[in-house]
């Protein structure tokens, strides 16, 4: 009977040790999980802050881009007009030269 009780106590002690190890592992995992959640929340807050900060800058850049595109188109038109004027001058010079010869 004593031997059976001793074996039972030994088994219980072993199981209690295993249970304590599992409890510690679970607590460690829970702490790790909480730390990761905190870290994720901090990163999410930073991302939101960056988005709020950068969106007005992006809007201004888009506005500048559209104005620069309009200026570029206007400059292209001025260049084309200048080219046509140079062609017209060259044709007038040829006409005058042919008339004077």
Image (cartoon, rainbow, N blue to C red):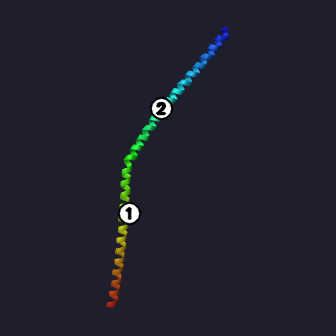
Up/down of 68 relative to 10, above or below: below
Badge 1: residue crowd in 10 Å (few <14, some 14–19, many ≥20)? few
Spot occupied by residue 9 in the image (x, y as percentages of width and height): 62, 13
Spot occupied by residue 33 in the image (x, y as percentages of width and height): 50, 32
Between residue 27 and residue 52, name the one nearer to us: 52
- Residue name at image x 51 percent, y 26 percent: 27
Up/down of 22 relative to 60, above or below: above
- Residue name at image x 56 percent, y 25 percent: 22
Circle 1 SS class: helix
- The N terminus sits in image quarter: top right
Badge 2: residue crowd in 10 Å (few <14, some 14–19, many ≥20)? few
- Residue name at image x 60 percent, y 19 percent: 15
- Residue name at image x 38 percent, y 56 percent: 62
Spot occupied by residue 89 in the image (x, y as percentages of width and height): 33, 81
Residue that carries the numbered disc 1 in the rendered image: 69
Residue that carries the numbered disc 2 in the rendered image: 34
Spot occupied by residue 69 in the image (x, y as percentages of width and height): 38, 63
Q: Compute the Cα span from label 1 to label 2.
A: 50 Å
Task: In the rendered structure, find residue 86 and report the number of the disc placed on it.
Answer: none
Between residue 10 and residue 90, name the one nearer to us: 10
Up/down of 86 relative to 14, above or below: below
Location of residue 68 (image quadrant): bottom left
């Amino acid at each position: 009977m004593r031997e059976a009780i001793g074996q039972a106590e030994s088994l219980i002690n072993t199981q209690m040790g295993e249970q304590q190890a599992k409890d510690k592992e679970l607590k460690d995992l829970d702490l790790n999980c909480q730390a990761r959640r905190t870290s994720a929340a901090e990163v999410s807050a930073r991302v939101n802050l960056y988005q709020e900060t950068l969106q007005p800058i992006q809007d201004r850049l888009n506005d500048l881009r559209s104005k620069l595109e309009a200026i570029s188109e206007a400059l292209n038109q001025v260049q084309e007009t200048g080219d046509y004027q140079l062609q017209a001058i060259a044709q007038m010079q040829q006409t005058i030269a042919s008339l004077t010869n």
